[in-house]
Image (cartoon, rainbow, N blue to C red):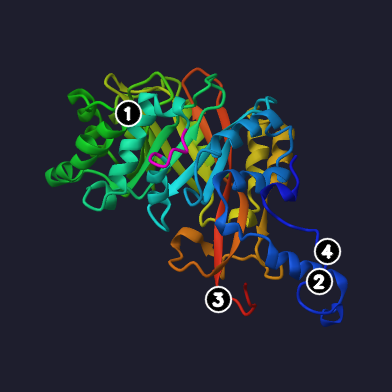
Amino acid sequence: MNGINEYGFETGFESFPFGEMGDFRNRNAFISETIQLRKPSLKNLTAVQYLSSVESNIPDELISAQNFTEMKKLASHFSRGVTSFFGFESRLNSSDARADYLFAVSSKRGEREALAQVFTNGSLPKEFRSKKEWQNVGKFAAAWADLSSVLYNKVLGLWFEFDTTVSSETPVPSIFIQTPSLRIDTPEDIQKCSWLTHIALPLLTGQPLSEKMEHRFLHALQQLPKGASVLHIASMLSRATTGLRLVIYKINPKDIIPYLTSLGWTDNKNEFTTLIKEIECVASRIVLHINITENGIDQKIGLECAYHPDQYNLETRWEAFFDYLIEKNACLPEKKALLLDFLGVEQDDATQEFDLTSYHIAVRIQQNDFSAALVRYISHIKICYKPNHPIEAKAYPGVRLFGQTKTNTGASYQ
């Protein structure tokens, strides 16, 4: 795949820019330090440059060259500063080297404002701007960046997910809204959700939430077991559905079946109970995904599986999880090998060892004077269950920008 020069790294120099060769311990040290100063920082890349920066780590067997080119073409429409966190969706039981493209936009470090500018600076092609789904996303982005809007403080972030298996010259994203913790324990809590049901979702979808749909949504929040809450709500704009995806965190695995039953979900063979118990043995974090429509809860349920606390590229337990899926005929052995080989890190300062003590997620760092690291890891694996159907498993390899501030390193950073 593409070489280092594609995203602006310079490696050829006609003369030494800083004095004599003898000033350096050896030629290799000189070249290393010179490249370090000349290359752009990882924290200043555009969406397409971020993709290019990991392209050499993604074999064609995982994501085909054509598929990756499509992703880069899409990413090229989003300007610098829109995202520092992106990833892919890979189907584990398929040899098809196609993956979906996802990226996050945070309310911090100017990413929200950069997204709003995408819709006003002409970077989106005309065919995008002419589609009502993109027009609605643009209106949502403008409101989110407006200090006077309720969305400014309520929406913590957005996830854009592009389904590349859908044949379309103008891709439409599904949008996941990240919110403060949502659950309903008192009548007052219902009113606290009105910004979402009456403003955010109608703005994003271009139509008001039906009374029946709002009732289903609020009922799903009211039935949440103790300790659980909704932190993401998605509108699957790219799909022929008017429902909502709810992503439920901190739900005790033993509460999943009773909760689903309270929403009208049924599983006569109780196979899901067995599956949950098995997953508890190989994952320490389970996040529940449900789809609700005017007619109730969809039969297909998602279990997002990962480990707590996050170890990112340093996580060692994924191998056992893949082995479990291979035994369940839900993962090809070659997909396991490809995804584990993806893990790694690229740093502005290669002399510093990456660790989670001195490096922190970049959007949580207020200042801009930090040394960046781009971490490649497995975010989670989602298992999809539908009664009387084989389980499906999808891996979500992610790439996230981290930073090490001057106060956390003894080395100088230019």
Q: Residues within 10 Å of mark 4 (few under 14, many from 20)?
A: few
* Residue type marked 4: Glu
Q: Is residue 28 left or right of residue 92?
A: right
**Residue under label 4:** 14
Instruction: Give the residue drawn at x 28%, y 30%.
Output: 262
| Residue 117 drawn in magenta | no
Which of discs 3 and 4 lies nearer the camera? The answer is: 4
Depth order, front residue of 271/247: 247
Q: Gap between marks 4 and 1, in whole Å?
A: 71 Å
Label 1 SS? helix
Query: Considering only vertical position in the picture, is 269 above or below 31?
Result: above
Depth order, front residue of 33/399: 33
Q: Gap between marks 2 and 3, in whole Å?
A: 28 Å
**Residue under label 1:** 261
**Residue under label 2:** 16
Label 4 SS? loop
Examine the image and state in which quarter residue 225 appears: top left
Which of discs 1 and 3 lies nearer the camera? The answer is: 3
Q: Is residue 184 left or right of residue 76?
A: left
On the image, the x and y values in percent for residue 345 come to: 66, 56
Find the magenta span and give its range: 119-124
- Which quarter of the rendering shows the C terminus? bottom right
Q: Gap between marks 2 and 1, in whole Å?
A: 71 Å
